[in-house]
Amino acid sequence: MEFQEFRNERGRLSLSPKQWIEKVQAIGIKSSSGRYGGTYAHVDIALEFASWVSPEFKLYVIKEYQRLKQSESYQHQIEWNVKRELAKVNYVIHTDAVKAHLIPAELTKKQIGFIYANEADLLNVALFGLTAKEFRLENPD
């Protein structure tokens, strides 16, 4: 019922920004008159008001936000692929070094496989912060 006094005879709000600020003790918005006057608001308030005034603007903000999130996702994907390519390029060097320096001749094929797997996990943790098993658990698809 408090808002009834803000309405004109047609039932629409009829307040200036200055009157609104005074009546509701609004914060985050300032209005001044005079040569350099105007109405200034916190960016969140301004965007919400502009979205309310113009559906076209609101759609623009939504589309721009979606584009930004897609761009961030793509950038993250590029970084991940660069790390993956780096690991792939160094794989042969790494496996040759493991074979030459870490594998004793008397081990079985299964034991040799464990050594390679442990070294691969060490690389995965260094590059990605996860072992291969942890990555598979976090990304089942």
Image (cartoon, rainbow, N blue to C red):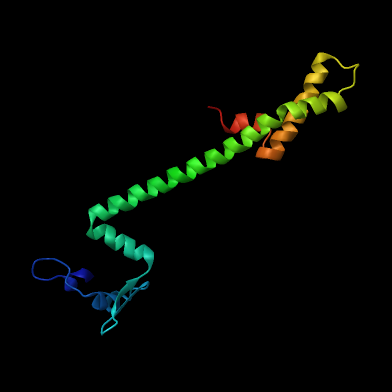
The x, y position of residue 132, in whole percent, is 66, 30
The x, y position of residue 37, in whole percent, is 28, 81
- Can residue 17 be seen from the camera position used here? yes
Residue under the point 85% across and 25% down: 100
Toward the bottom, the furthest residue is 34
Question: Which quarter of the figure has residue 39?
Answer: bottom left
Q: Is 91 placed left or right of 13 in the picture?
A: right
Of residues 12 and 59, the one drawn nearer to the viewer in this rendering: 59
- Can residue 102 be seen from the camera position used here? no
The x, y position of residue 94, in whole percent, is 76, 29
* Above or below 31: residue 51: above
* Above or below 82: residue 15: below
* Above or below 45: residue 19: below
Question: Which quarter of the figure has residue 49?
Answer: bottom left
Of residues 49 and 10, the one drawn nearer to the viewer in this rendering: 49
Toward the top, the furthest residue is 109
* Above or below 119: residue 46: below
Toward the left, the furthest residue is 9
Q: Is 103 placed left or right of 43 in the picture?
A: right
What is the tally of numbered marks visible in this picture?
Answer: 0
Residue under the point 26% across and 84% down: 35
The x, y position of residue 38, in whole percent, is 28, 77
Of residues 45 and 115, the one drawn nearer to the viewer in this rendering: 115
Question: On the rendered image, what quadrant is the N terminus found in?
Answer: bottom left
Q: Is 107 placed left or right of 6 in the picture?
A: right
